[in-house]
Amino acid sequence: MIKVIVWDLAGVLLHTVKGTFESLLAERLDAPEEAIYEAIRSEVNDRWDLGEMEDDDYYTWLLQTLEQPLEKKPILQRFVRDDFYIHPQMLAAIRDYHTRYTSVLLTNFPFHLHEFLQTVWNIDGTFDHVIASCDVKLLKPDPRMYQHALNQTGCRAEEAVFIDDREINIEGARSLGMHGIVFRDPQQTIRDLNALLAEK
């Protein structure tokens, strides 16, 4: 029986206002999309998600890496704050499931996550537990991050389902015995989740 639903943030509940993260940031900075793709998959980006770098230091590194002037730092600040939105259908669905199941947010995200949950995104209280890489010093798909979620909720792996838009992160959860659903769009995800919950 499923007792816990674990949700990813970016790419599931949080989306860019248009295009992909890489394409939109490339447009905002007038920088090559390929260079941005490489930068955000770097060890330095991981350090940011792990809470080992302040936002300002990360923005400085990113602009220097992209050979962009530091005067563009306000563009990055606006991008992070204003170029994303909480998908209303997914938020409504998550809140509905929350009335029947323990709800967990499990995300690779820097420290500004906590402020934005309460202010910019206004979804504070939607989840019973918020587990972020910047706090636990782990990154998906490290199995220890999923185990941390299981420990927090007190449930067994087979009693939890994890939803993420990246297959590699789903594989990390499945390695512990959790159920997994790859997010492609809200309709598919809700349909697949309802089918799993009906079975379990």
Image (tube, helix red, strand yellow):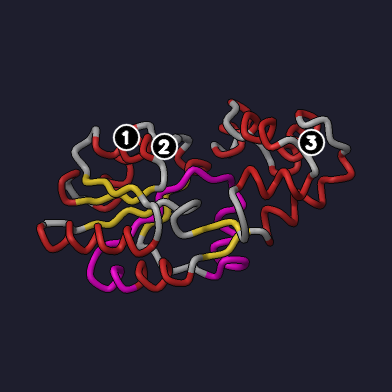
State the residue in front, 8 or 136.
8
CB under 8 Å between callouts 3 and 2?
Answer: no
How far from the left and from the top, in percent, is residue 88? 47, 71
Local crowd size for mark 2, using a 10 Å CA cut-off: few (<14), some (14–19), many (≥20): many
How far from the left and from the top, in percent, is residue 32? 74, 35
Image point (35%, 70%), residue name: 93
CB under 8 Å between callouts 2 and 1?
Answer: yes
Q: Amino acid at mark 2?
A: Lys
State which tag comes first along the sequence, 3 or 2. 3
State the residue in front, 33 or 68.
33
Image quarter hosting the C terminus: bottom left
Q: Residue reaching furthest top?
A: 43
Local crowd size for mark 3, using a 10 Å CA cut-off: few (<14), some (14–19), many (≥20): many
How far from the left and from the top, in percent, is residue 3? 19, 58
Which stretch did the figure color magenta?
Answer: 96-122
Q: As displayed, is residue 66 above or below residue 93?
A: above
Image point (35%, 62%), residue name: 128
Disc number placed over residue 63 in the picture, else none? 3
Q: Is residue 46 left or right of residue 58?
A: left
The secondary structure type at the circle numbered 3 is: helix
Determine the image quadrant of residue 78.
bottom right
The secondary structure type at the circle numbered 1 is: helix
How far from the left and from the top, in percent, is residue 38? 63, 29
